[in-house]
Amino acid sequence: MNVCEPHLHSSDSFLCQYSSSSVDDLLRDETVIAVISSGDRTSADTDPRHLHCVLPVLGQTSVHEVWYAPERVTAGRDGDLQWSSGEELLFAAIEVDERDYPSLKTAIHHAYVQLFDLSERRGYPSIVRVWNYMPRINQGSGDTERYRQFCLGRQQAFNERRYQASAYPSACAVGHDGHTTIIYLLAARAPIKHIENPRQESAYHYPRQYGPASPSFARATQVDWRRGRQIFISGTASIVGHESRSPHDLAGQLQVTLENLEVLLGESARVCQSGNAPAMDLLKVYIRHPLHFAPVQRAICDRFPGVPALYLQGDICRRELLVEIDGVATLGHCATCSLPY
């Protein structure tokens, strides 16, 4: 069987790697800005750079998502928030127990306001990418569905901070069986550019049938670091226009999802006026049912051979969807950018 296991990436311009080293060993590196662990929690997160997410890892017992800065980072805690930062990049995270709030909507609104305020205070105004892992994402019906209530709280925070839809960052929202919502983000000092997929309706323009507040995210986000230009890709699933394709059909959904990724990479090259499509550097794959791990892994390895991939069990935001993929890509020569490549 064709197996693509996560491994270290050697590119000097790459900010993230997957590693099976121990958390303690990883955090000894003072350029590590964040270590994101998945699966069962084995120790307290005493270092602000370490965040534990409860989504189970598929295919391996322990793999960590490790973000690096090119220089020594600083880190701390600010109320409920944990953060670390380098010259260009801020990592910030919050764990929310909604039992402390009147409603899920209120809890999410409060969490996002805190994250936005921290990013502004510390001088990283450009929100690049947000990961949202929440309990029981599909529970409830109609507008009471938990994902729709999550979207309401997030939208309220964006509205209060006067975000235009064109400024919404890339994001994903995935469900789990734990008790708290984990939200973490990356923010930059530099201006960024958000990118939409011409094959999909912008999520923030979805019709009313998807809830009282449309999902507030971009399909991808481009960032110009000193070391190169990267594309952060949102959670991408089997959606064309605004409609789910191949509901409950894994093979059909994989085909549509991978086609959506290819179109998005091509659109990123067009928007950035690059002669070549971005090269995918890293993938994170969310799978609703663990029994689908092997066929999903084969499809990913066939389409993106050699690209490190982390597979997590998680519920996709629409009940009929079985798989979602996000990732990071590096863009080559850019006609409008003076950065060396």
Image: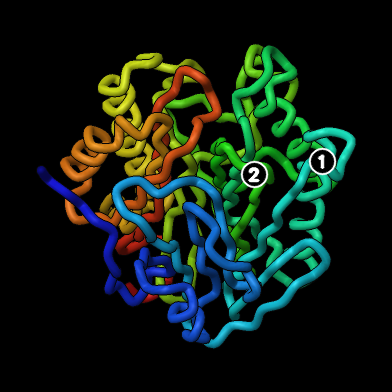
From this view, report whether residue 22 is shown above or below residue 165. Answer: below
The extreme right residue here reads 102
From this view, report whether residue 231 is shown above or below residue 317. Answer: below
Occupied quadrant, residue 158: top right
From mark 2 to mark 1, how far is it between C-alphas? Answer: 28 Å
Residue 210: percent from left, percent from top: 63, 18
Q: Nearer the viewer, residue 144 or 265?
A: 144
Left or right: where 279 falls relative to 117: left
Q: Identify residue type, mark 2.
A: Tyr
From this view, report whether residue 27 is shown above or below residue 264. Answer: below
The residue pinned by badge 1 equals 99
**Residue drawn at 47 percent across, 40 percent down:** 235
Residue 56: percent from left, percent from top: 45, 46
Q: Nearer the viewer, residue 152 or 335?
A: 152
Residue 242: percent from left, percent from top: 51, 19
- Say which element carries label 1: helix
Quadrant including the N terminus: top left
Crowd band around label 2 with a 10 angstrom C-alpha radius: few (<14), some (14–19), many (20+): many
Left or right: where 224 falls relative to 275: right
The residue pinned by badge 2 equals 168
Q: Identify residue type, mark 1.
A: Arg
**Residue drawn at 59 percent across, 83 percent down:** 73
Residue 326: percent from left, percent from top: 42, 45
**Residue drawn at 68 percent across, 70 percent down:** 83
Disc with the residue nearer the chain's start (2 vs 1): 1
Residue depth check, mark 2 versus mark 1: number of the one nearer the observer: 1
Label ID, residue 83: none
Q: Nearer the viewer, residue 109 or 294?
A: 294
